[in-house]
Image (tube, rainbow, N blue to C red):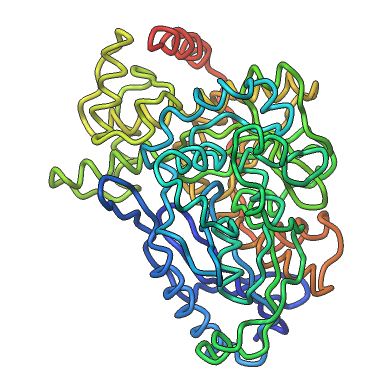
Amino acid sequence: MADQVYLGIDLGAESGRVMAGLWNGRKLRLEQLHRFANVPVALADTLRWDVLRLWAEIQDGLTAGARAYRGKVVSVGADTWGVDFVLLGRGDEMLGQPYHYRDARTNDQMARAFKVVPRAEIFRQTGLQFMQINTLYQLLALQTTRPELLSAAQGLLLMPDFIHWALCGAKVVEHSNGTTTQFMNPKTRDWARGLLRKLDLPTRILPPVVTAGTELGKLRAGVAARTGLGDLRVVAPPTHDTAAAVAAVPTTRTGKPDWAYISSGTWSLMGVEVAEPSLSARTLELNFTNEGGVDGTFRLLRNIMGLWLVQQCKQSFERRGAKRTYAELADLAAGAPALRSLVDPDDSRFFNPPDMPRAIQEYCRATGQRIPRREGELIRCAYESLALKYREVLHSLEELTGQRIEVIHVVGGGSQSAILNQFTADACGRPVIAGPVEATVMGNVLTQARAAGALGSLTELRTVVRQSSQLITYEPVQSPVWEDAAARFQSGRAAAR
């Protein structure tokens, strides 16, 4: 039995888990206590998150943790995706059902914002990649579609901060997730209130900002009684799931931007860890982002559509009666023709199409390529296109930092995809180190352990990750076909515009 146990609540775009991190002073072992689906709900032509059901599932997981490790649990903390939020009114009453970031209401909001505040000024004040899902554009959409909610709002909590409020009553936003809003200043590390005022958005709703490792309080009496966890500490980990995952990258090169990471899941977030935000005109031109990390670092990265393409293809195949596991789809992709059809994963037609295979086929038709029709052809197209997108982002990172990247770490669920890892190594011409799969939860619970004094530096934390994980290295196979494919990838994207 472990000497100490830390509970990590981890919500992703497809599922949520409550995990136990068992720490024996040298290694961390993870145990899943409860797993549950996280499926968006269509409601009156909108797309919402069912946060009350998620909260009920979380409590079931915490109850399981109390039963399994009574008396050994030190603290609990939550991480989730970014940008989405809950509004609280008077008396801390929830206002409305929170929107999903893929809801269509934000489609025209970036253009609306730029009419008031120029794009370059928004970037100067926030350092964030321009994406219609950002909280800034969600608030602008709410200003138009549901102004009464915005008027009644007394507080805004991002998703992990809402969970912490439900746990202990703290109304704060942890820095790493706060930076995904596009209204936090990377220099002051506080809210860009002047930007919100120019856009006529309320600043009274903004809570205090805290850093990862901050103790937020003890469990509410009701939660303590229902779960059996008693007087338990609630500690804010890096609450953005990518920030938690990057904290758990098993690199030995902490402090040097000569390694890159890909946090691979529904989204692929590819970047480097830097000490200061990059706010240059070139960073803006390349549409890179500066998101908060642990110990005052920043994650200079690009958000890439990621395995969303594969996930949505799988769902489409299932609707047509072909149920395949991801492993089976990878086998079909391995047997399909190589580098025949390529798409830009970030093309807007892939954001939330009714049918992903058809969207891929339409892109290929529009760019004069062979049209993938079989399941394996479609999945291979997605994997190869992602690898080529990673290559493009790699070169941009090297340009922005002036540093050659020697190795790429792939963490998260996508690190299990051997075919994508090998394509990435081949396309980028760099070794790929895959793992850990559970980097996000490891970053979450190890940050809690660090807050409790069980660990010291970030380097020490990453040493624990290496000691506790099985890692696989994929060496690049040099082939001129990837150079040709990269050129076709670029020309195809130009033709698709």
Above or below, 425 relative to 312: above
Closer to us: 176 or 105: 105
Residue shown at 42%/74% (left/top)?
57
Above or below, 328 relative to 425: below
Above or below, 26 relative to 192: below
Locate residue 217 relative to residue 31 in the image: left or right: right
Locate residue 489 relative to residue 378 in the image: left or right: right
Spot occupied by residue 365 in the image (x, y as percentages of width and height): 26, 13
Locate residue 446 relative to residue 85 in the image: left or right: right
When asked about the image quadrant of residue 233, the answer is bottom right
Spot occupied by residue 28 in the image (x, y as percentages of width and height): 68, 70
* Residue sticking out furthest to the left: 321
Spot occupied by residue 329 in the image (x, y as percentages of width and height): 30, 42
Spot occupied by residue 407 in the image (x, y as percentages of width and height): 69, 34
Residue shown at 52%/87% (left/top)?
227
Quadrant the C terminus occupies: top left
Residue shown at 55%/84% (left/top)?
223
When asked about the image quadrant of residue 31, the answer is bottom right
When asked about the image quadrant of residue 371, the answer is top left
Closer to us: 273 or 391: 273
Quadrant the N terminus occupies: bottom right
Closer to us: 149 or 243: 149
Residue shown at 77%/66% (left/top)?
214
Closer to us: 473 or 148: 148
* Count of numbered marks: 0
